[in-house]
Image: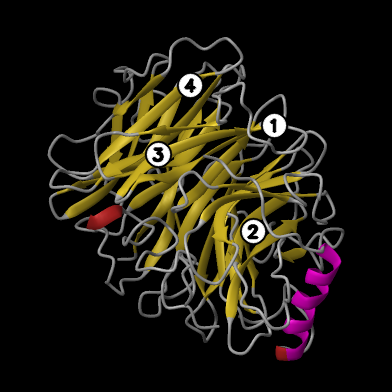
Amino acid sequence: MKNETERPGTWATLASAALLVCALAFAGGCGDDEDPPNEPAPDGGTQTPDGGNQTPDGGNQTPDGGTTDGGTQSTDTEFAAVRFNTDGTVDTTFGTNGIAKVDVGPASGTTREILWDMKADSSNRLVLFGGKKGDNRTDLDRVVVRLTADGALDTTFATSGVQTLNLGGLGDNARGGLIQSDGKILASGYTTMPTGVGSQSSQRVVLQRLNTDGSADNTFGSKGVLTSMPFLPADPANTEWGAAEAYAVGRQSTGNYVTAGYGRLGASGTVDMLSFRYTSTGALDTTWGNNGTVLLNVQNQDDRGRNLVVLPDDRVFVVGSAVATTNNVDAMVAFLQANNGALDTSFTPDGYKLYSFGRPDDSFFGAAVSPAGDRVAAAGYRAGGSENEDSTLLLLPIGGGGGAEFAQPVPTSTTANDRFWAVTFDATGKAYAAGFVAEGTDTQMVVARFNSDGTRDTAFGQGGIAKINVVTAGNLETARAVVVQSNGKVVVAGIVEKQ
């Protein structure tokens, strides 16, 4: 069943409350130049929104590479981007011998650099979205890094190529991002903020918009930053609050921003997939869903939005996961109507579809739309049971074109764990999915190229798969994002152990 209802909220009241909390705790408000708190895990603050043992990034693994990523290690990490030629060989003209690394800060315990997304602008410059340990603190601060088209740190951007957002005393969990046609950059994520009810804290959406040069865009939110809880409890001053997160953000042709993530209406219980829409200046658009919120509740259990892409007709394609039956998580996709966010029943009678790949834990994390607008793609993994984790891929025709649906496991190794985290298309309509493969005690970045029918393109890499070992004997190495530059070259980005 589906459920798009949620508690009504008032944008002005919430915005004022959020700013008041920041102002009382940290004089000066919630701007770019302030400091955040304690967040021991790299993925979600001290309070997880699912109310159980899982972290918000997907199960009990850390967000950087599945069960083989050394989740309890305190190893330092750094951002890494790798470029492949059109045949899958490493392009040694990029960065240093094909690899660009950026160290944005030291680790502190399990808090270390984490990269979630990358986009290319009209000049093929690469913008990385992630987080780092806050200065003299153990929480995460949001960072946006820009590289030149060939992998050098773009020192004309922000401060020596790196823009850092410190929310006053609050750990900031960076997630996705986008680059507008005018060059402005919008980053999505969430933070855990005091609610003013006792010692309670709750997650809320944080969006940040930057000018092309990396400075804060003061025409958006407050000094370029928006903190938002689009639904409030009936009595915000005395009632425990719910939680809201934004894993991904897209932009419609109207200039409005649409998010995908998950959260809950109360302080405990299951989580639901959530989508919010905001105007170009950062106001909640109450025409979206129910008073600004679209909520998908499949079976009154945990449902999560992980990514989205806005289609040419302004509909929104959301990917993630849902609990179909007890202890069985299926990958999920949904289409939202362009005007009001209602589930698009022209796709299926319910507006969403679940995919089971034969394991108890299936999820999609990557989403893309083809240049022709006739297909969408989702990439993720299947895990659980006594077998290896496998990458999965969905190629779905839309608008009456694009061929047949393809939805299958597509492992990059028959003997090791592998997962896809991201997917994109090139100008010819071929799909690229990126993630990691664990070979013995070593984990490598991996990218695979697929034909329109879902078969691997054997003209790329080895049998359609290209792998690179950025650091030897490292198990904190994974690609989290993939883009294809205008010359057809393929760039993947993620994190690696610092050695």
User: Marks 2 and 4, Cα distance to the nearest angstrom?
Assistant: 40 Å
User: Marks 3 and 1, Cα distance to the nearest angstrom?
Assistant: 21 Å
Which one is in front in this view, the residue at disc 2 or the one at disc 1? 1
Which one is in front in this view, the residue at disc 1 or the one at disc 4? 1
Sequence-earlier tag: 1 or 4: 1
SS label for mark 1: loop
Look at the picture and state if 388 lies above or below 45: above
Which one is in front in this view, the residue at disc 4 or the one at disc 3? 3
Q: Residue at image x 82%, y 58%?
A: 220
Instruction: Answer few, some or many: residues within 10 Å of disc 3's Cα (few below 14, many 20 plus, some between 14 and 19).
Output: many
Q: Does residue 483 appear in the picture of this structure? A: no
Q: Does residue 472 appear in the picture of this structure? A: yes
**Is residue 255 covered in magenta?**
no
Residue at numbered disc 1: 337
Tell me where residue 279 appears, x and y as whole percent. Answer: 82, 49
Q: Disc 3 residue type?
A: Ala
Residue at numbered disc 4: 396
Instruction: Answer few, some or many: residues within 10 Å of disc 1's Cα (few below 14, many 20 plus, some between 14 and 19).
Output: some
Residue at numbered disc 3: 331
The span picked out in magenta is: 11-24
SS label for mark 2: loop
